[in-house]
Image: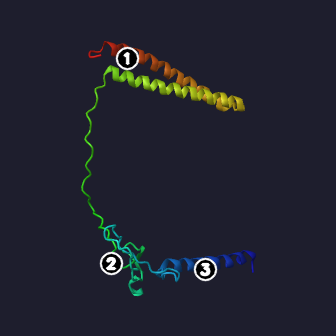
Amino acid sequence: MRPRFLLFLPLGAALLLAAAVAVHFLLSEPEPEAAPAWVSPVTVAPPATPATAPTNPEPVKAPPAQALVARVEVTEEGKRATVVPIQPGDLVPEPEVENPPPQQNDPIEPEKPQTAAWKHGKMVRMSELLERDVERLEEERLAAEKRGDGEEAKRLEVQLRRHRARLGKLRDETETLAETARQEPGQ
């Protein structure tokens, strides 16, 4: 025999075995599992109200063991579900509604007029946030320089220059809007 043929024989057998195992798992249906022996039946007693609660309550008698047996069913989607019979005192949930009623939203407040004073306030807030960002970036740049991370320090320096340029533009716009807001009627 040639050595090449000796390689294909075990390889073919392994592929045939893998195909048989795959077919077995794909075509066999899972068997429903029985409840483990250690699971004990559970009963639910209705809650006692303070006005009707007896001072010496009697123990709740458990229904027969056959009534508490849960069974496993396969749903239409192919999923398994545990079904437990309804006992006295159980609360049955309402079925899900396919199209629930529309939710009432809060009324939409009318938009505030975007006056020069309003825009000035927004620009001042943006400037404050950008100043905090510049301070944070400066601290990060100094920390990167202390660590000896020159590449990170350069990246942060470029970002700082961009932030500072934008901050300068925002301050100019803020001054212009402050002047316009002072001249606006009603101020």
Mark 2 sits on what residue? 88
Alpha-carbon neighbours of circle 1 within 10 Å: few (<14), some, or many (≥20)?
many
Residue at 52%, 83% in the rendered image: 37
Please identify the quadrant where the N terminus is shown: bottom right
Mark 1 sits on what residue? 177
Q: Nearer the viewer, residue 63 or 9?
A: 63
Q: Nearer the viewer, residue 172 or 7?
A: 172
Residue 10 in percent (x, y) is at 68, 78
Amino acid type at mark 1: Leu
Alpha-carbon neighbours of circle 2 within 10 Å: few (<14), some, or many (≥20)?
few
Residue at 67%, 31% in the rendered image: 144
Q: What is the distance, in whole Å, between disc 2 and disc 3 at their CAs?
A: 54 Å
Mark 3 sits on what residue? 17
SS label for mark 3: helix
Amino acid type at mark 2: Pro
Quarter location, residue 111: top left
Residue 101 in percent (x, y) is at 24, 56
Amino acid type at mark 3: Leu
Q: Which of marks 1 and 2 precedes in the sequence? A: 2
Residue at 58%, 29% in the rendered image: 136
Q: Which of marks 3 and 2 precedes in the sequence? A: 3
Mark 1 in CB contact with mark 3 (< 8 angstroms): no
Q: What is the distance, in whole Å, between disc 1 and disc 3 at their CAs?
A: 80 Å
Circle nearer the viewer, 2 or 3: 2
- Residue 95: which numbered mark, if any? none
